[in-house]
Image: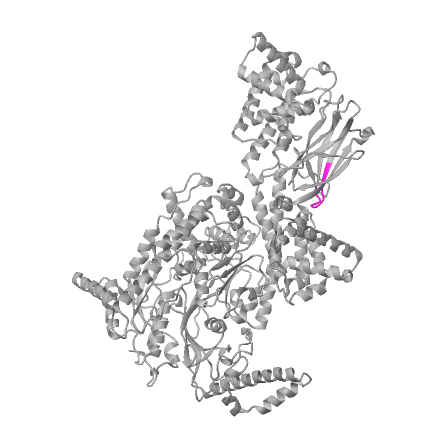
Amino acid sequence: MSGVTSGTGSASCRFAHYFVVCGLDTETGLEPEELAGESFEQSPLRRSFKSKVLAHYPESTDRSPFNRDAVNMLCMPHGLSFRSQADGREHHFHSFTVAQDDGTRSYGFVHTYYEAVTSAQITTAMQTLHQMHHVEHYSTSSLSSSSASSPSTSSTDSLVSSMDELDADSLAARPLSACLGCAAGSFQPARDTLYASKALCLLTPLPFLHAARHFLSQLHQAVTSHTAPPLPLESYIHNILYEVPVPPPGRSLRFHGVQGPIVCQQPGPEELPLGDYPLGEAFSLLGVENMVRLLTSVLLETQVLLYSQDYQRLMTVAEGITNLLFPFQWQHVYLPILPMPLHHLLDAPVPYLMGIQRKDCSQCSTLDLSHEANLCFVDIDNHRVDPPEDLPLFPDQPELIQELNEVLLRFGLQPHGGATTNPAPAAPPCLSSLVLEDLMEDRRNGNLGGEELAMLERLQALARRCGGMEGGKTLGRAFQEEEEELNAAKMNVQLREVFAGRFTAIFGRYEEFVIHSAPDLESWLGNRDGTSNFDKGSFLSAQPAPHLHFLSWFLETAMFSSFLDSKVLSRWADQEPLQRVFDGRLEREHLYNTFEDDPGNRRYRKCSVLHKSAQAIERRLLKADHTAIHPHLLDMRIGQGRHQQSCFPRLQADVLAQGHNTNNPIYKPRMGRGKCKYSTGRRSLHQSKLLDPSPSAVTQIQRGFVEGLLSECRLKTRRMLMERMGKESVELGQGKASITGLQENTLIHSLCDLLERTWGHGLLLKQGRSALWSHLLHCQRNITQNTAIFENHRISGSIFFVIFFFRFVQTMSEGLSEVGRARAWIHLSLEKKVLSQHLKLLLANQNLIRQLYKSHAFLLCEEEREQFLFHLLSLNTVDYLCFTRTFTSISIPYRVVITPMKKLSIAMTMSNPWVCVSGELGDSGVRQIPKNTQEIFFQCQNLGRLSTLQLGQENSGLLSKCLVDCVVVHNEITGHTYRFPCGRWLGKGVGDGSLERVLIGQLVSPRGEEESGRWTGTPPEQSSPPQRLSSVQVQEEMREAVNNLVKHFHKAEQERGNLTALLCGEEGLVRSLEQFLLHGFKSSRLFQRSVFIWDFVEKVVVSMETADQMGDLRGSTELCDSLCHYANAINASPRNIGKEGKFQLLVCLGVRDQLLPQWLPLLAESHLTARLYEESALVQDRAAVNSLSRILHTLHEFPITLETALIKGVDL
């Protein structure tokens, strides 16, 4: 048996906060809605007028103050409308939401209908408007005809004469349809009845959509009914405001409307939050794939604009998508219904989720939007979602779509988007229908016995076969509506559970990566912006590779930051409800050990709680746990509450101003656990201010946008600097990696988005989707027409350099859109370290800026603009390769310069020299250097970051030789210069006799510093006699070289550097092993000039082959054969790479094929070793050799791929 409860008490415990009536104020008369954007050519019956809040009860509440202007705008977003008896006057329902500054929301539910106008003043005013409209269009028609027959006739004379010819009688007699633009009909008070729209609104703290809709519908039915309701309307309104409580968590509540009982429920503390909006309708409108795309756009905090003729469709999609965000919350502007007076907010340079109404027969192409680069446009009526460019896929998107399709099909819905029909309004039930509803209510509450229940089921079956009673709702229809609402609720929770399961799988171990660095709350709050709460790099390294693109973007969003802030704050304050539910689910998952040990290779698992969640909501809806106090007679004055059909009465305000005291509240608000409450949102805008259309408020809002853009620029550039500097310290061996290449790309993408939003703020004239690219187009056109617009020649020359970048991006053959071209221009300027300079030059032409932008635009705020450019200037302190690594298929011009050793003053004599440049993305192929020159220009596909360079010449005798100091390669587009040190002879009879060198490159920054670390350059030539290092130093260098290789493979793939540099660079493996084998060498006299380890290797190989022929070979024959085979293959190569190159190639092949640790003992145990090395040599120390072999064995677990430049010509 359910208990009878009351809701009197705290406003937060009550079902509804306010009851509001909006409509026509007869005292103020007709005021045109100037901001509706309508033309006066329309008939007055088709225009919008200002509506007013006619009444609201109570006057105000402490926790939710009444915002009169906002509620009025949202109740009638398009203003007050009129109809005549000849027009359609269908009543309709819509809802809205109002966000508070603390992030909480209240919900409004509106039933709009047309009511006859009884004011003679209003009908006369409407008649006057029609006459003026008739005169204007008749005059326009006369002017057109007279100008055609007599062009010299004055238009003013024609208008005056036409006004004289027309009087009121002729206007009334002339059919209005004959006038131009008056096809909508005329209005005559003696003949026509005038109707004005009126809205009945219920404001609630929670989204009780179905319950509020039923209550307002029954209230409207009572007003339009021929018979008066059992009680005055004040009784029902007083009951819903003061005596109906919010259901406690996990319980349902039944209360009574005018025509019958209404049931609402609230999920339990461990269930998903209340979501009453029909997700099934949203999926039917857009389709599953489009809904997933839309959710992805919302999760990545793009600008989302909904577009539909139906206000309720806007709310259904918006609320449905935000309900799917659990456990995250939207942190930015949220206005699913944007009234006409607030359309200036479409210019907001921040992420938003807003909806606007489609005008009759209008197309989305007619919308003038300043921000389109990062906009997700949702045309609900046409079932279309246009996401931003390069939107990543949601993790496991194909499997997710399949699971959602299965849920929809179980409830009889097709997964593809299509039109849906709104349910027809229910007819007012007659008395017998109410009796049957009472029976059904008893059935829900479990009050029917076995025989009674069987009888009711037979009645239901009979009703379905034979129909129902005339003039009322059939029993079959009643059961059908109940079943439809139940199925909709079950489908809602199952669709939400599918997405909740996805987030549980993705972030199941997020707590392991949360950083709790602050010792107390005060220190954390004081350094909130400068503190990182999450180890993003480690988290991403544990995720599957296909998910990284989406996750790297999502980890940078405000909703994820707010989620982490809430987690950190839970150490000192009450945990947020959503996070408490999510963490509870994770605890249960951990308890049952459902998470896989290797999250990087996890498989898609379908949600396992769909049936359980549907059962919980079904139990609450079929059997109400509590019953609210029934409506009852109030202490009203005599004559009040009289029923007048189709006219909503003036309610008795003193009765509805406050509730009567009762001592039986359903429950009291839960008290905290002794911890403080803190807000986790990082909102820079006051949500309540957004709903104020006054000029002062609009100015304040635009000022807030300007300050927000500047603050965002400061935080983004600071984050990029900190992360990039941390990355560079890692490359220099001075720290731990804190960012991956993917994260860096994400930060640069967010910078592009910020610049697009900044250049789009207050924009008047735009070409294409990109505001920044549009500005570049205007700038180019102005320069072409007039180059004197700049202050001096220096600026003029610089702006032409900006346009050179612009034209190069235009010629890129990658099929880029305007947005893609703008991003390419930003990437190129950032890599060349001229982004701030170029943007400053674009803003030098203030006359052009004033033509393109409104007065409140960010680019016209001088102080903020200068600070913005200063923050961007700080990015010049770090190096980026964002353009080189992003636009990989473009053609780049390169310049190669060979520099001989100057100190010897020997002219360069080379025979047909050539170069081949290699990078991350490929190589240039062999490029011949012209005779008598030391440089070459060539153009080829982007090579990426350069790594190696092959320098060679033909075998043309002893005179063709050159001592090369270095080779310099310059990227003519990005300006990057790579230096390839050599310091060796190239030619026969000198050095090691090499005719070809493989050089390792260094990226030289514009400051002249070598950026890439200590081990990247080509190692210097060995001196003779060699520099003697201690055994400890040699072993330490060897361990360091192997350790660098191990760290290389333990990094994320996007973060790894150049493997060739780690193998062959100055402190690479080849150099370290060479030092090991040179340690303790007796003398260089055996090799006459320089000491080359390759000579020693060759002698050992000859010795092994001789011993093998004599049958005296000791040790493993297979290992000896492999060493001999590799050495002979290298010697047989057609490439003349010299002795140093041959030894380098042997080491690289040995590491790749996992043979090097086994070759070292063979070299150490050779009889030649004892003759050529001192007893103290490391190669003579068996323990040192075994230790080195064990160290090299650690490289066997990694797949080592060698560059083509290293192994070309060797078939092994």
Q: Residue at x 58, y 38 (%)?
A: 1056
Q: Is residue 213 magenta?
A: no
Q: Return the x and y of residue 643 as percentages of the image width and height.
A: 33, 82
Q: Is residue 485 left or right of residue 526?
A: left
Q: Return the x and y of residue 398 as percentages of the image width and height.
A: 44, 48
Of all residues, the one furthest to the left in this rendering is: 451
Count of number-bearing discs: 0
Q: Residue at x 43, y 58 (%)?
A: 417
Q: Quadrant of the C terminus?
A: top right
Whether residue 736 can be seen here:
no
Q: Is residue 913 above or below residue 253?
A: above
What colouring does the structure picture have? one colour
| 267 or 352: nearer the viewer | 352
Q: Read off the magenta span.
A: 968-976
Please identify the quarter of the rendering in which residue 853 is found.
Answer: bottom right
| 611 or 959: nearer the viewer | 959
Q: Is residue 48 left or right of residue 879?
A: left
Q: Is residue 972 magenta?
A: yes
Q: Is residue 1145 left or right of residue 20?
A: right
Q: Is residue 918 above or below residue 718?
A: above
Whether residue 1129 can be seen here:
yes
Q: Return the x and y of residue 668 as percentages of the image width and height.
A: 35, 63
| 1132 or 356: nearer the viewer | 1132
Q: Return the x and y of residue 584 as percentages of the image width and height.
A: 39, 50
Q: Residue at x 33, y 76 (%)?
A: 235
Q: Quadrant of the N terminus?
A: bottom left
Q: Is residue 1121 above or below residue 803?
A: above
